């Protein structure tokens, strides 16, 4: 399964580039100025608006840097009804698909949600910190491109399209720094709690097929419950060590 990408709304709003996938039937990637290749996205923020417009439901979710515009196809779908039932405002997490169109000569950006879940502020703050970490990793590679030392083809495509300069890179870094400073500090305990192990086992039991369940699936489901990727991977590792589960193939785990 393809993993999700974490991007701040403030960076996503600057997108003007799409890159076709190697497989013609797959949707194109929406590429951000910071070098994120977005197709499936995991975002979090405050649900600020839910509106029926024609046959579509439009929604807005604000993170500390800006706003994501969400478009739900089919106003009578279960997902559309789920959006209507949520309180406005409230903290949510969303998994959705990045979309970019040219409309009357202007770029139109949106996210088409596949799922939404009501969460608390701590989950939103964890998303902010994890997204900041991912963004800074991409900016590090972009800085290498400025110095002529980057060999990552996808980063170079974004670098050339957006004509990234030190000034632009600094603006993105300052954006990340400002949102991190606004988040309440979290504990640094990296130990695996029994609750995380139990949660991971539940996901394995519910979603396991003949080849098990993908680690990416577990990470995404755990993220919707506010559990960091690092805690999930540590839990899986401890379960393997304790002979509670095994890896039938790379990237998949299955209970014994």
Image (cartoon, helix red, strand yellow):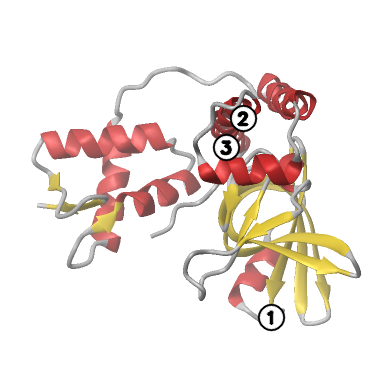
SS at mark 1 in the image: loop
Q: Which residue is mark 3?
A: 127
SS at mark 3 in the image: helix
Q: Residues within 10 Å of mark 3 (few under 14, many from 20)?
A: many
Residue 46's x, y, as percent?
A: 72, 45
Identify which residue is drawn at 86% across, 69% down.
103
Q: Earlier in the sequence, mark 1 or mark 2?
A: 1
Identify which residue is drawn at 21% across, 35% down.
237
Q: Is residue 106 above or below residue 24?
A: above
Question: Are the residues at dot 2 and dot 3 in contact (C-beta closer than 8 Å)?
Answer: no
Q: Residues within 10 Å of mark 1 (few under 14, many from 20)?
A: some
Nearest the eye: 233 or 109: 109
Q: Is residue 22 above or below residue 91?
A: below
Q: Which residue is mark 1?
A: 74
Question: Are the residues at dot 3 and dot 1 in contact (C-beta closer than 8 Å)?
Answer: no
Q: Residues within 10 Å of mark 2 (few under 14, many from 20)?
A: many
Identify which residue is drawn at 78% across, 46% down.
14
Q: Which mark is residue 33?
A: none
* Visible residue check, residue 117: no
Q: Which residue is mark 2?
A: 139
Q: CA distance from mark 2 to mark 3?
A: 18 Å
Q: Is residue 220 left or right of residue 47?
A: left
Nearest the eye: 251 or 27: 27
Q: CA distance from mark 3 to mark 1?
A: 28 Å
Question: Are the residues at dot 1 and dot 2 in contact (C-beta closer than 8 Å)?
Answer: no
Quarter where residue 160 is shown: top right
């Amino acid at each position: 399964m393809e993993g999700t990408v974490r991007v701040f709304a403030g960076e996503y709003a600057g997108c003007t580039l799409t890159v076709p996938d190697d497989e013609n039937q797959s949707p194109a990637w929406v590429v951000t100025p910071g070098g994120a290749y977005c197709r499936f996205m995991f975002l979090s923020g405050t649900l600020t608006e839910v509106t029926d417009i024609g046959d579509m439901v439009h929604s807005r979710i604000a993170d500390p840097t800006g706003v994501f515009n969400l478009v739900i196809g089919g106003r009578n779908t279960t997902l559309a009804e789920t959006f209507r039932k949520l309180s406005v405002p409230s903290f949510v997490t969303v998994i959705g698909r990045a979309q970019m169109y040219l409309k009357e000569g202007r770029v139109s950006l949106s996210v088409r949600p596949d799922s939404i879940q009501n969460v608390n502020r701590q989950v939103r703050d964890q998303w902010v910190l994890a997204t900041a970490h991912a963004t800074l990793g991409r900016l590090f590679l972009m800085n290498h491109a400025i110095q002529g030392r980057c060999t990552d083809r996808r980063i170079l495509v974004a670098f050339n399209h957006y004509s990234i300069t030190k000034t632009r890179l600094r603006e993105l870094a300052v954006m990340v720094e400002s949102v991190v400073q606004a988040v309440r500090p979290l504990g640094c305990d990296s130990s695996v709690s029994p609750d995380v192990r139990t949660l991971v086992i539940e996901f394995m039991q519910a979603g396991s097929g003949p080849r098990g369940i993908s680690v990416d699936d577990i990470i995404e489901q755990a993220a919707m419950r506010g559990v960091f990727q690092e805690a999930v991977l540590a839990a899986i590792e401890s379960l393997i060590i304790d002979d509670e589960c095994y890896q039938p193939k790379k990237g998949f785990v299955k209970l014994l």
